[in-house]
Image: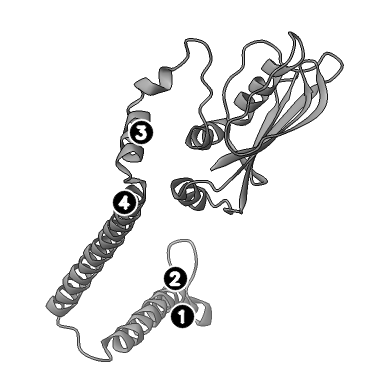
Amino acid sequence: MSLVEVRIHGLAVVDEALVPVGRGFTALTGETGSGKSVCITALRLALGDRVDGDPIRRDRDTAGVSVVFDDVPASLRHRLGELGISADELTTLSREVSRAGRGSCRVNGALVSQAVLRELGEMLAEVTLQGASHRLMQRSRQRDLLDLAAGATALRDELRHAVGEWRAAEATLEEVRRRHAAGATEVDAARHLVAELGSLGMVPGEDEHLAAERLRLRNASALAAASTALRRGAAGDDETPGAADLLA
């Protein structure tokens, strides 16, 4: 893996700059104020680091940086796949910052959060400032160095892949168990309903019979009301003479 280039625009004293980096050891030299520290600041920004102060050039409202790496490790390609980002031949990290506080981070053109940019940046490079070798105290970094020294990075990647498949299989099994439990609950509910219906002693066609009986009873009620009204009309009462009285 190697850093291919650093591109800068609107950062500190730099308007536009492209810094190509070759394989092997590279040294940035120059007089004070020539922009050496700006290149380091640009690299830190592109890797997702926080930078103290206002790094934007005075005549600009925004600043942008990008870095390009080639031959990135398989672990980073795997992580890009998990994030849904295409793993191209060259891996590009870019970032834009604004005086208004808004900004954006991209990896191979895909928008990501600053936290994701920092995570991927730590897998690609380490920027060590004066007295800033704190990453050596991180357990993840110590593990990476141990795997690198033992030549076990490929084995670690295989293990990570196997663990990922195992967790996916566990999730699938849990989903199958959940669906089985839900199906068993539905079966129990259906059995309970069948038992309740069986206790009623219902026979085939009984629902049609009950509907007809309901209609008959409804008609009988209407007939009874009409009969009562007819009797009252024929007999009359204290205030209204009946039909027999009217015919007399």
Can you identify the residue that label 4 sits on?
A: 155
Q: Earlier in the sequence, mark 3 or mark 2?
A: 3
Label at residue 244: 1
Residue 60 quadrant: top right
Going by the numbered disc 3, the residue's amino acid type is Leu
Going by the numbered disc 4, the residue's amino acid type is Leu
Can you identify the residue that label 2 sits on?
A: 236
Can you identify the residue that label 3 sits on?
A: 145
Categorize mark 1 by other alpha carbons within 10 Å: few (<14), some (14-19), many (20+). few
194 is higher (above) or lower (below) than 81: below
Query: How far across and down, in percent of the image, does residue 8 sit?
Result: 75, 29
166 is higher (above) or lower (below) than 137: below
Q: Earlier in the sequence, mark 1 or mark 3?
A: 3
Q: Secondary structure at mark 1?
A: helix
Q: CA distance from mark 1 to mark 2?
A: 8 Å
Give yes or no for contact between labels 1 and 3 (Cβ–Cβ under 8 Å).
no
Q: Earlier in the sequence, mark 2 or mark 4?
A: 4
Q: Earlier in the sequence, mark 1 or mark 4?
A: 4
